[in-house]
Image (cartoon, rainbow, N blue to C red):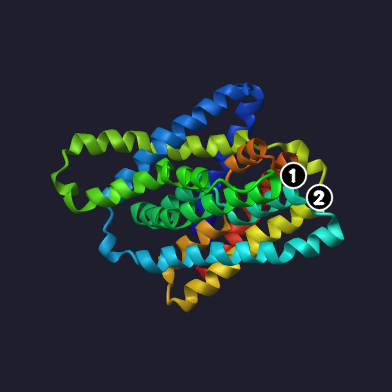
Amino acid sequence: MSVVLGALFPIFLLIILGLVLRHWLIAEDAHWVGLERLLYYVMFPALLVGTMARADLTNVPVVAVGGTLFASVLLMAGICFLLRPLLARHLGLDGPAFTSLFQGATRWQVFVALPLAGNLFGDVGLALASVALVAMTPVLNVLCVSVLVRYASPGAPDWRDVLSGVVQNPLIWSCAIGIALNPVSGSIPQPLFVFVDALGRSSLALGLLIVGAGLRLAELARPNVLVFITCALKLVMMPAIAIMIARGAGLAGANLMIIVCCASVPAASNSYILARQMGGDAPLMAQILTFETVLAAITIPTAIGLVS
């Protein structure tokens, strides 16, 4: 447990620093939006290309790790749909609010998962977490956009837009490029890897600063029952589901811990942007993200400690 807490401590320090910087040094939203675009389209892809290109994938249970998290996402999505009529009847859950609950319960914060995996297990951890990214990102994009179109927007979903968003996702492409380069990585000039590493390693800290900058602490003063239900689904039930499936698949040790890392992190911060752009309940989404990020400081080490 001390190793887990040691790996988590710098991560949450960086998140707190991002919160401080957002309020005391870089208050303009436009600066953080620009940094997030730089991170999403340049620096994070560099990290994934470099990691996957040099990873020893022969010793990584790609199918078992990816399949476990893929199945976990689908099961959680099914649970959200089963809960929707019950919550609508007793808590007045409407369509836009359901989309925020759905995103908050299913999506994962890659900016937290990758640094955590790297801190715990180095390059092997990053490679395993990248496998998780490949498994989870396409299905989550399709599910979340579809749910927003169905429950928060009028009219039928335009599947061309949904598929276009998945195909154009830079994180998926960067993992694919890294895997394609893996067999010939020994022939790639070393200075190119130094360049990619310089971009990629700095992305881990920047991503956590952006997570902190996105926190809205004022939301903590207005708790909502739906927020607590979403937090329970994402921070408690999702890791439990992932652990159950992983153990059923025979996974243990570092492989199981990486799965728990990816399953137990809070929802992605760009869930708020998607909710705002597509008619979801953006204020509720902001509350969910803030509560999940704060509570994750307790739930992540607890979940990892249970399997370590």
Q: How many marks?
A: 2
Mark pair 1, 2: CA separation: 8 Å
238 left or right of 138?
Answer: right
Q: Position of residue 73 (x, y in %)?
A: 55, 61
- The label nearer to you, 1 versus 2, is 1
Crowding at mark 2 (Cα within 10 Å: few <14, some 14-19, many 20+): few
SS at circle 2: loop
The answer to whether residue 304 is visible is: no
Secondary structure of the residue carrying tag 1 is helix
- In the image, 125 versus 130, the foreground residue is 130
Which quarter of the image is occupied by the N terminus? bottom right
Identify whether 265 is placed above or below 218: below
Task: Specify whether 35 is left or right of 185.
Answer: right
Residue type at numbered disc 1:
Leu
Q: Write down the residue under mark 2.
A: 224
Q: Amino acid at mark 2?
A: Asn
Residue 4 x, y percent position in the rendering:
51, 57
Q: Residue at x 65, y 23 (%)?
A: 24
Of residues 46 and 17, the one drawn nearer to the viewer in this rendering = 46
Which mark identifies residue 56?
none
Q: Earlier in the sequence, mark 1 or mark 2?
A: 2
Q: Is residue 184 above or below residue 275?
A: below
Q: Which residue is under mark 1?
A: 284
Give the residue drawn at x 58%, y 33%: 18
Q: Residue at x 56, y 27 (%)?
A: 32
Labels 1 and 2 touching (C-beta < 8 A): yes
**Crowd band around label 1 with a 10 angstrom C-alpha radius: few (<14), some (14–19), many (20+):** many
